Image (cartoon, coloured by chain):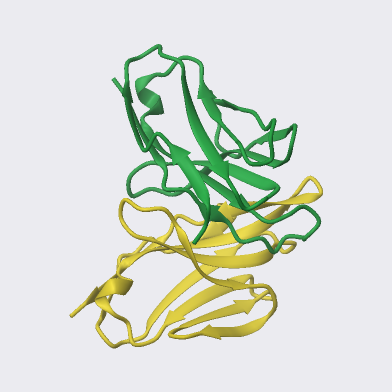
Chain colours: A yellow, B green
Amino acid sequence: QKEVEQNSGPLSVPEGAIASLNCTYSDRGSQSFFWYRQYSGKSPELIMSIYSNGDKEDGRFTAQLNKASQYVSLLIRDSQPSDSATYLCAVNVPSGGSYIPTFGRGTSLIVHP
Amino acid sequence: EADIYQTPRYLVIGTGKKITLECSQTMGHDKMYWYQQDPGMELHLIHYSYGVNSTEKGDLSSESTVSRIRTEHFPLTLESARPSHTSQYLCASSGRRGTGASNIQYFGAGTRLSVL
């Protein structure tokens, strides 16, 4: 079992809709959870970080964390074609007294006009 | 905007050559990382460092080596390149030691390596 799981997609939504991206992780000791966006041929860039249970909103983006269920999600409201990219879930997994960043395989999002 | 730089951006070399991929950051970050990513595939951590003279192997077996002699510099070396090393290599850095697990990673633009 991979430590961080994501559905690879593609997830296709119409412009203006809400896109919902999900991620689960296996190590209960994990801390610090991140969503990165990666356009084709580019490097990942941070969209959202979340560290405690609940919701965190930033503009059109909302990250949700449920540690009991080991589940992180990203909601994108009013989706735009420019949101089309791969979204990577990253989790800091405990290892040897420290934390190692571990990425899921990413979910491809397509927002069609 | 993050200040982390990778050179070269693109490299085409022959089998058996020794190469070094450069990565430098000006943010004073203690933590630095190297990832390997094939097109359309996931990121794999191959090396990381949490400070000067500290290096560790990641979860993906790699024939490369790294060094961390200065805080800002984290080069990756392949002693003898092979076609199987063809990939994109991404360098990243994150915050200062002692700040816990909450560090956000900033990525360089990447080096796309092709070994013929």
Pinpoint residue A69: horizontal percent, then vertical percent. 64, 75
Q: Is residue A36 above or below residue A57?
A: above
Q: Nearer the viewer, residue B72 or B11?
A: B72
Image-quadrant location for residue A70: bottom right
Residue appearing at x 30%, y 55% in the figure: A40
Residue appearing at x 74%, y 36% in the figure: B52
Pinpoint residue A80: horizontal percent, then vertical percent. 28, 80
Image-quadrant location for residue B68: top right
Pinpoint residue B112: horizontal percent, then vertical percent. 35, 37
Q: Position of B26 compared to B11: left or right? A: right
Residue appearing at x 25%, y 75% in the figure: A81
**Residue B62 visible in image:** no
Image-quadrant location for residue A52: bottom right
Q: Position of B76 compared to A82: left or right? A: right
Q: Position of A39 compared to A29: left or right? A: left
Give the quadrant of the C terminus of chain A: bottom left
Q: Is residue A55 above or below residue A39?
A: below
**Residue B39 visible in image:** yes
Give the farthest residue toward the front: B26
Pinpoint residue A58: horizontal percent, then vertical percent. 51, 83
Q: Position of B12 compared to A45: left or right? A: left
Q: Is residue A54 above or below residue B105?
A: below
Give the farthest residue toward the left: A113
Residue appearing at x 53%, y 53% in the figure: B3
